[in-house]
Amino acid sequence: MHAIHITDIESAINYWREKSPSPDGITLAPELRALAGVYALMVFYREDDVDVAGFPTEAMTAWHAWYDTTADTPCIAICSTSQGDEMCKGCGRTFEEVQNWPAMDPVAKRSTWRRITLEATSWRFGRYADRALEKR
């Protein structure tokens, strides 16, 4: 399933809340209404992910606008896959993810970002500082 995680929906909602605040405390911007509808259904059905196949066009447009404000790549310019590692020690992506990153769509990229963030084992997450302390 090609899906968007609820945390990305929340981030997009917060982006639009800041970008287009309610003028009266009640009215929502169209982008917020679209994303809130998706979010409400996810909460109601207790879903963590929403399949992009059924994602409303207005909500997808709002999500993409938020996505365009995020970092494009987790790369920290220390790529161990070029040295033969299957998993990059620098960013946490697999060899295939590193190689195919330019061709990946935004949903696949965000899914990868989520995985490496949850794992938090790559140097990108400050582990190299911990390792420097351990060697002393």
Image (cartoon, rainbow, N blue to C red):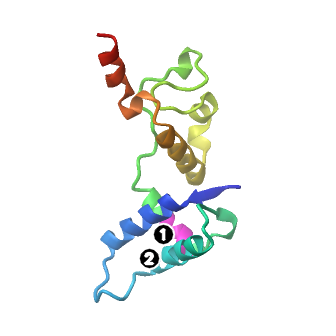
| Residues at marks 1 and 2 touching, judged by CB atoms closer than 8 Å | yes
**Residue 128 point in image, percent of width and height:** 36, 23
**Residue 16 point in image, percent of width and height:** 38, 70
Q: Which residue is depicted at the point 53% across and 72% down?
A: 39
Q: Residues within 10 Å of mark 2 (few under 14, many from 20)?
A: many
Which of the two labelled residues, at mark 1 and mark 2, occupies the earlier sequence position?
2
The residue to which callout 1 is attached is 62
Look at the picture and state if 62 lies above or below 125: below
Q: Which residues are magenta?
A: 58-63
Look at the picture and state if 3 lies above or below 135: below
Q: Which residue is depicted at the point 46% across and 29% down?
A: 122
Q: Is residue 13 visible?
A: yes
Q: Amino acid at mark 2?
A: Leu
Q: Can you tell which mark lies on residue 43?
A: none
Q: Secondary structure at mark 1?
A: helix
Residue 103 is covered by the magenta coloring: no
**Residue 125 point in image, percent of width and height:** 39, 34
Q: Is residue 76 visible?
A: no
Q: Main secondary structure of the magenta part?
A: helix
Residue 62 is covered by the magenta coloring: yes
Q: Which residue is depicted at the point 60% across and 35% down?
A: 97
Q: Amino acid at mark 1?
A: Ala
The residue to which callout 2 is attached is 32
**Quadrant placement of the C terminus:** top left
**Residue 47 point in image, percent of width and height:** 61, 65
State the separation of the CA atoms marked 1 and 2.
8 Å
